[in-house]
Amino acid sequence: MVRLRKWMILTHRWLGIVLSLLFVGWFASGIGMIYTGGMPALTPEERLEKLPALDMAQVRLTASDAAQIAELSRPPSGVVLLNVMDRPAYRFLGREQATVFADTGEILESIGVAEAVTIASRFIHLPKDKLHYRGLLTEPDQWTITERRQLPMHKITADDDARTALYVSEQSAEVGLQTTRSTRGLAWVAAIPHWLYFTPLRVRGELWTQVVIRTSGVGAVLAALGIGLTVIQFSKKKPHIAYAGWMRWHYVTGAVFGVFTLTWVFSGLLSMEPWDWVSGGGSGAGMRQALAGGALDLSRFPALNAAAWDRMLPSGPIKEIEFLWIQGEPFYAVRGIDSGRPILVSANLLQIRSEPFSMESLLERVKLGNPDVHLADFQMLHSYDSYYYARGQERPLPVLRVKFADPDATWFYIDPKMSQVVARFTHRQRVERWIYHGLHSLDFSFWYYNRPLWDIGMIALSLGGLTTSGIGLYVGATRVLRHVKRFARN
């Protein structure tokens, strides 16, 4: 027993010396993550707000005509009509991507420096002489790590109070990312140290993954040893703590916040999905196709009549029109009329559809999407449950939840207004929800939706973990310095 205790003390001591600085950074940045959320990004709402309005009178081609010009070898997974460089254009999404201008049929190839600066000027509402071109990025910098799919991008900085930097995609001719001095500063004290998003490390995906998994794993061992030592080192016969000074405070704070530290580090490890334990499995691979009713048939969408659209939607500018195939019929999802959800319009009748699709039609297609598995249960939810809930952004309600009796106990959540799958969870993913989000973010409904109660609890626990880690860092640094001085004297 004495030998085991000595081994635990030495292991905890030296692991702590190595990892305590990382723990301090994780806890301190975790408080920042409560409010920053992550790396700087251009949200869909911000993008839509900045997107110029469509001039429907300039649309000369149908979506089917544009697809033929683009020479797509397969039906696109999505089609959007939007304003690109002050001209209406069809954007085809999927494995084959292309942008075709709807006025002339010209294909957008790529944009140069002059076009990129013009796009940035209109986006930020500043004259061109206030903008500075910084070059074409073909490899990610610190801020485009999560936007690598949009590269190459033109980087342009602005002479404004916010010190804005804009990244314009060469292929889409849109601003794909916007950062400011404040968002960059917040990232350096929150997301970057918290996720170890340092460019030289993060661009090497496999190396970054292994570093996070291994440091989190060793950190969990460190926290578990600390919890064990709080029990072993406490005398039951004559209750007292066998430490003094800073070590005593490290012992006390570790005893109080050690369990939280362990669960937090361990859940962070699980967020990386080691051994792909959450990925894969589940049934219903054809669910989305069944709800759509087949592939997108652009020949069923008529030519756009500007006058008819003005009569149907007179209330405000249209920013974007998405072409959808829903239950075997063509529809438009119109965005930009207001800040809420898209307006669904029947392409055949050119009428707004305000009613959701019927429960019967949804269930009929749900069964077609998973024909060989028994439908165990279904329910229309008018509030969030423990798995489908808002994580910093609104998700549509009501939603139809269907449960299948397959080996992975697959659940689907379907938006009845759009007849689309909005979430899918297998049994393993539902378990992961509790041991990752539950243990890491403590996002339990009884206080997650009662902010600032959740904020107070998370900050208090994080400060506790920061205190015990900070004391451990000080004690470890002092010990190392003492050894260095002794070695220098000898």
Image (cartoon, rainbow, N blue to C red):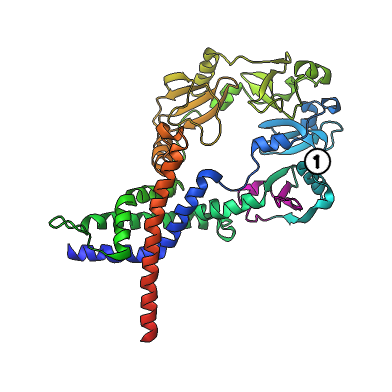
Badge 1, how many Cα within 10 Å: few under 14, some, many 20+? some
* Rendered position, 243 above or below 347: below
Q: Provide residue 295's location: percent of width, then percent of height.
A: 65, 26
The amino acid type, in three-letter code, at marker 1 is: Leu
Note whether residue 11 is visible. no
* Left or right position of 11 against 319: left
Q: Provide residue 165's location: percent of width, then percent of height.
A: 71, 51
The residue drawn where x is 56% and y is 58% is 198
Q: Provide residue 176's location: percent of width, then percent of height.
A: 69, 44
* Rendered position, 435 above or below 61: below
Magenta stretch contains residue 166? yes
The residue drawn where x is 51% and y is 47% is 33
Single out the residue that lies furthest toward the front.
245
* Left or right position of 294 against 472: right
Q: Provide residue 127's location: percent of width, then percent of height.
A: 83, 47
Which is nearer the eye, 449 or 325?
449
Magenta stretch contains residue 11? no
The residue drawn where x is 15% and y is 55% is 236
Q: In what element is the residue under mark 1?
A: loop
Residue at numbered disc 1: 108
The residue drawn where x is 59% and y is 56% is 203
Note whether residue 488 is visible. yes
Quarter-of-image position of residue 456: top left
* Left or right position of 388 against 249: right
Q: Which quarter of the figure is the N terminus placed in?
A: bottom left
* Rendered position, 215 above or below 324: below
Which is nearer the eye, 477 or 83?
477
Q: Which residues are magenta?
A: 139-168
